[in-house]
């Protein structure tokens, strides 16, 4: 069987590993329009700040494709898909036939219409090449603005602040990481960021920029503020790279529509990662979850189904673990339930010591958590979520600083511990 994978990052790599777990006979060809694939995008901000070296970005060994017996074509862009005759055409006219195709083309950064992308100092952060361009600009820049307070924007702002640059986050929302955390956790984080050269302007947007001789000199906000800066990172969300599927009969909504097997609406064609729309368990609707862990899980399921092994993707749950300005943060699932959702919300916070703990329960099962500052029992809580454990016998104890393995053993016995240790 000929397997063709377009895109070489989290989803594509996971699919290869899933296929090769069982099948060394099928041929695998992979196309990537990047020249240096197999690095972790999530780590780019840490490379920007100098916290990790170049080698630290690597996601798999340099011998990965050889070891997995995959023919990788770098610098090749797939531009057309013929679903009926089962082939893909690249920008150089080369043609790749397939029996099974995985579209793992990820997403691209959005650039609003009022921000010209050809002005020196205006950047987005998606690829290693983008990170290199930002590094070059940062050498000359006295100040930076990051537009967007989501995951990518905030991580980038922290990196710039840590490398000594005065940085301002401009964002429409009333809190940072609005998809992940609530207002109180956001307050703690922004307080910490302010001590690290990163200011946050909530409820603001960029209404335009000033430039001189083709280079950025200032950002203007819709609240009338002018912020002098030589570097602007636009991090206002991502757009799934669906163009390969368009006009082929494959259904596309917010991303390429997929079933639980990660198959698209065309037989033998699968999609996974940032490009794919899947069921979102916490939001209870179909959506694109542009997260590394989701891309890996979906790529794995796609890989297995491509070789006829039954696997199913239950749905995405937003989960993230990061360190913002020295504060560890783990957020999972439904962290901001609507009032009418019938959820019980347990909160314990100490703003002055940057500690915050929130657990969202529904029908005595944990549906979401925010752990800020203290995350040592995150594994146990995540295990309770994954096992869908009924926690009614120890709901109150969940908020205790003593909550740990011993408490769990007393309450639910060994099953949950075993599940945690094998996860
Ligand atoms: C700066 C940054 C920080 C992040 N931090 C986090 C984090 O902390 N936690 C988290 O969960 N997620 C994070 N993410 C998101 C995470 O990186 C993505 O969810 C993940 O990379 C998606 O993987 P993917 O395989 O679907 O696609 P991508 O990683 O986007 O890769 C797709 C690949 O396909 C290539 N491609 C696209 N179109 C074509 C074509 N037509 N032909 C050939 N090749 C093509 C692309 O160039 C790219 O190499 C971060 C992202 C960025 C940019």
Image: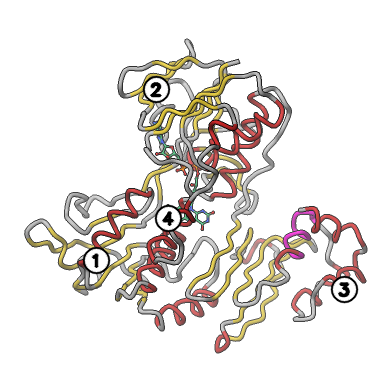
Residue 261, x across and y down, in percent: 65, 31
Label 1 vs 3, first from the N-terminus: 1
Residue 387 is covered by the magenta coloring:
yes
Say whether marks 2 and 4 touch (CB < 8 Å).
Answer: no
User: Which mark, residue 139?
Assistant: 1
Residue under numbered circle 3: 406
Q: Is residue 414 above or below residue 371?
A: above
Label 3 vs 2, first from the N-terminus: 2
Label 3 vs 4, first from the N-terminus: 4
- The answer for how far apart the CA atoms under marks 3 and 2 are is 57 Å
Residue sitting at x 56%, y 85%:
351
Q: Which residues are magenta?
A: 380-388
Q: Nearer the viewer, residue 417 or 148?
A: 417
Instruction: Find numbered disc 4 in the image and state the secondary structure of the residue it sits on.
Output: helix
Say whether marks 3 and 2 touch (CB < 8 Å).
Answer: no
User: Which mark, residue 247?
Assistant: 2
User: From the viewer's perspective, is 358 left or right of 159?
Assistant: right
């Amino acid at each position: 069987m000929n397997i063709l994978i377009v895109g070489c990052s989290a989803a594509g790599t996971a699919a290869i590993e899933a296929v090769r777990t069982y099948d060394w006979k099928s041929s695998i060809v992979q196309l990537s329009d990047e020249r240096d694939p197999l690095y972790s995008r999530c780590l780019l901000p840490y490379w920007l700040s100098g916290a990790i070296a170049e080698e630290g970005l690597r996601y798999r060994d340099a011998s990965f494709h050889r070891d997995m017996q995959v023919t990788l074509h770098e610098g090749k862009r797939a531009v057309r898909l013929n679903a009926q005759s089962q082939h893909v055409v690249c920008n150089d006219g080369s043609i790749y036939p397939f029996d099974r195709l995985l579209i793992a083309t990820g997403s691209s950064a959005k650039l609003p219409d009022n921000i010209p992308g050809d002005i020196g100092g205006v950047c987005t952060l998606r690829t290693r090449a983008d990170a290199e361009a930002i590094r070059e600009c940062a050498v000359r820049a006295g100040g930076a603005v990051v537009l967007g307070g989501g995951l990518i924007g905030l991580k980038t702002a922290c990196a710039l602040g840590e490398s000594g640059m005065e940085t301002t986050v401009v964002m429409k929302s009333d809190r940072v990481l609005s998809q992940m955390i609530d207002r109180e956790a956001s307050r703690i984080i922004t307080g910490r960021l302010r001590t690290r050269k990163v200011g946050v302007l909530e409820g603001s947007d960029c209404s335009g920029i000033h430039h001189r001789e083709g280079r950025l000199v200032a950002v203007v906000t819709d609240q009338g503020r002018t912020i002098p800066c030589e570097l602007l990172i636009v991090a206002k969300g991502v757009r799934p790279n669906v163009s390969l599927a368009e006009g082929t009969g494959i259904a596309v909504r917010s991303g390429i529509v997929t079933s639980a097997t990660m198959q698209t609406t065309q037989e033998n064609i699968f999609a996974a990662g940032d490009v794919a729309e899947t069921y979102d368990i916490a939001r209870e609707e179909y959506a694109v979850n542009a997260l590394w862990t989701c891309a890996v899980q979906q790529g794995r399921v796609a890989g297995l189904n491509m070789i006829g092994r039954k696997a199913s993707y239950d749905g995405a749950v937003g989960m993230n673990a990061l360190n913002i300005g020295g504060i560890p943060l783990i957020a999972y699932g439904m962290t901001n339930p609507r009032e009418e959702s019938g959820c019980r919300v347990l909160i314990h916070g100490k703003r002055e010591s940057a500690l915050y703990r929130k657990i969202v329960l529904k029908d005595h099962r944990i549906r979401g958590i925010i752990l800020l500052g203290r995350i040592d029992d995150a594994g146990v809580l995540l295990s309770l979520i994954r096992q869908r454990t009924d926690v009614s016998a120890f709901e109150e104890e969940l908020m205790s600083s003593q909550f740990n393995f011993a408490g769990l053993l007393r309450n639910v016995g060994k099953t949950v511990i075993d599940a945690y240790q094998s996860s």
